């Protein structure tokens, strides 16, 4: 039987983020607000009073502020996998806005899949105790 | 959405706060030959300094990459120079990562080979080379660059294939970034720090080395290997069976050298089970792994000093055991490789 050749330039390894070094997946957070509408007033307060402190505490994130008049305030997070997450800020208090910005920074950017249902076993490694085998017990069942 | 519209969409537009001139003068010129391509202009602009420093913080190299210029150098591929010279012929060429990438590639190859050879002492040479490629090869480097978030910071220019060189791919340009970073760590700090960088980002990723071991005839390979170790010739014995003559039999076969079991395999036929048992025996030999606390890496003799030629007061180095090379059982050691058929040269009459 012929063996398949290994093409060395096509070989790759798969990520294990956090096993030694951890790379936060958040790249950039963009805060968009309107200068006049009252729905953006909490966002304006957050940007004036709290954003600098949050940005200094998280130097690995790029913070961008965009003025967008006539629109509702949003926070948009950009991730290393190329996806982005958008959170509206118009019905939140200032502390709520800080929590949503923290949520964006904690996320990995992966698409949220439902937990229940088809996702039964998720593992990249073999089971620690092995899978039970009826042939490897002391008295196997004989028909 | 195609890649062009995705790049030009408003959420991924080039930020302009850090640019000296915006809008660019070329865009508002009204001459007969006014040709302004916004996409090319966007590709030529540098990323904002905040993005570059955030990248340096994210990968934990803020102390090594102290200025945005250093980060920019690591993220500029040499293909960018042509594009830059075409549109800004009077300005000096921007610093690029070509030299750093070459040095970093050599360092990564060194660290990966010594680590894998010390971890798997009996691994066959071709598999060891494949494992090194899997750990620090071009696709892995491109993947690490993507996970670091370096994709929007990369400055490159797509180059088509020429008669002498293949086309430049995005993954190849991306792969130059982690290599350049490894070289920068070596230059700014020491070899030990560069080794720690490569171990953290590359040598702890998931690679299935077992899948790289392929056998043409494992029974014959095992016979030759056992003869090399001067043990009794392998003998396969049926250990357990069930369902013989039914539509789903299971046989469990063990391969023994004298009284020692070398490997075990299962199968729905006796031949299949014996084949798997021989494969299992060879896997148990080739994939023998040195525990991490016993691992001795040759580059540790260079010590922690920035100058590798300076003598260190480190503890005396005792090398790890050299493994046995694999037993070659086909002609010229090219077992399992299909050689291209050679046609006889046409004779001119």
Image (spheres, rainbow, N blue to C red):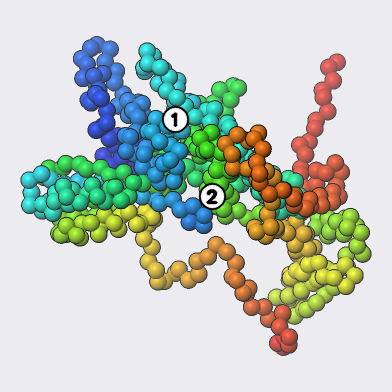
Which of the two residues, A4 or B324, is positioned nearer the viewer here?
B324
Quadrant position of the N terminus of chain B in the picture = top left
- The residue singled out by tag 2 in the image is B200
Residue B86 vertical position relative to residue A137 in the rendered view, above or below: above
Marks 1 and 2 in Cβ contact (< 8 Å): no
Q: CA distance from mark 1 to mark 2?
A: 22 Å
Q: Is residue B198 visible?
A: no
Q: Which percent across, then down, holds residue A73? A: 17, 50
Q: Residue at x 73, y 86 (%)?
A: A138
Q: Camera-side residue: B349 or A80? A: A80
Residue B270 spot, x, y in % from top left: 80, 70
What residue would you read off at disc 1? B73
Could you tell me which chain the residue with mark 1 belongs to? B
Tag 2 subunit: B
What residue do we see at 47% from left, 27% from top? B96
Marks counted in the figure total: 2
- Which callout, 1 or 2, points at the residue further toward the start of the chain? 1
Q: Is residue B266 left or right of residue B110?
A: right
In what quadrant of the picture does the C terminus of chain B appear? top right
Position of residue A2 in the picture relative to residue A66 (left or right)? right
Where's residue B268, x and y in %? 73, 71
Are callouts 1 and 2 both on one chain? Answer: yes
The residue located at (56%, 47%) in the rendering is: B196
The kind of secondary structure element at disc 1 is helix
Vertical position of residue B214 compared to residue B162: above or below? below
Mark yes or no: residue A59 visible. Answer: yes
Q: Give the class, few, some or many, for how many residues have Cα within 10 Å of label 1's Cα (few <14, many ≥20).
A: many
Look at 55% across and 43% down and name the residue there: B193
Residue B220 - label? none
- Residue positioned most to the front: B313
Kind of element beneath mark 2: helix
Q: Position of residue B255 (x, y in %)?
A: 83, 68
């Amino acid at each position: 039987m012929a063996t398949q050749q290994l093409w060395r330039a096509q070989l790759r390894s798969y990520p294990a983020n956090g096993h030694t070094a951890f790379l936060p997946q958040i790249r950039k957070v963009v805060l968009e607000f309107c200068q006049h509408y009252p729905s953006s007033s909490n966002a304006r307060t957050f940007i004036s009073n709290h954003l600098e402190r949050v940005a200094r505490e998280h130097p690995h994130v790029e913070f961008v502020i965009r003025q967008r008049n006539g629109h509702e305030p949003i926070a948009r997070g950009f991730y290393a996998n190329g996806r982005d997450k958008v959170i509206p800020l118009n019905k939140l208090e200032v502390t709520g806005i800080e929590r949503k910005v923290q949520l964006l920074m904690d996320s990995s950017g992966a698409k949220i899949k439902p937990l229940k249902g088809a996702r039964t076993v998720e593992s990249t490694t073999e089971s620690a105790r092995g899978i039970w085998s009826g042939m490897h017990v002391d008295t196997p069942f004989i028909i | 959405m195609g890649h062009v519209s995705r790049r030009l969409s408003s959420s991924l537009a080039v930020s302009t706060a850090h640019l000296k001139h915006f809008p660019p003068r070329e865009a508002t010129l009204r001459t007969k030959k006014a040709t302004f391509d916004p996409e090319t202009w966007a590709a030529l602009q540098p990323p904002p300094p905040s993005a570059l420093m955030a990248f340096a913080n994210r990968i934990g190299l803020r102390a090594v990459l102290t200025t945005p210029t250093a980060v920019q150098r690591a993220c500029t591929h040499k293909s960018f120079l042509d594009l830059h010279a075409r549109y800004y012929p009077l300005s000096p060429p921007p610093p690029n990562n070509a030299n750093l990438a070459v040095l970093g590639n050599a360092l990564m190859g060194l660290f990966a080979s010594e680590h894998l050879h010390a971890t798997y002492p009996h691994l066959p040479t071709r598999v060891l080379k494949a494992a090194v490629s899997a750990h620090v090869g071009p696709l892995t480097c491109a993947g690490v660059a993507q996970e670091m978030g370096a994709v929007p910071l990369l400055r490159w220019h797509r180059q088509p294939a020429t008669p002498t060189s293949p086309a430049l791919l995005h993954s190849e340009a991306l792969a130059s970034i982690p290599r350049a970073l490894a070289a920068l760590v070596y230059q700014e700090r020491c070899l030990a720090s560069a080794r720690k960088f490569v171990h953290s980002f590359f040598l702890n990723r998931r690679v299935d080395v077992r899948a790289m071991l392929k056998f043409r005839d494992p029974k014959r390979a095992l016979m030759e290997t056992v003869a090399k170790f001067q043990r009794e010739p392998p003998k396969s014995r049926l250990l357990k069976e069930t369902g013989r003559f039914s539509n789903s039999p299971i046989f469990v076969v063990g391969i023994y050298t004298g009284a020692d079991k070398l490997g075990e395999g299962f199968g729905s036929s006796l031949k299949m089970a014996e084949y798997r048992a021989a494969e299992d025996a060879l896997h148990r030999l080739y994939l023998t792994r040195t525990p991490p606390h016993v691992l001795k890496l040759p580059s540790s003799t260079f010590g922690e000093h920035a100058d590798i030629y300076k003598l260190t007061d480190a503890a005396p180095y005792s090398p790890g055991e050299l493994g046995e090379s694999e037993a070659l059982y086909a002609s010229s050691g090219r077992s399992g490789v299909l050689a291209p058929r050679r046609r006889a040269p046409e004779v001119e009459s």
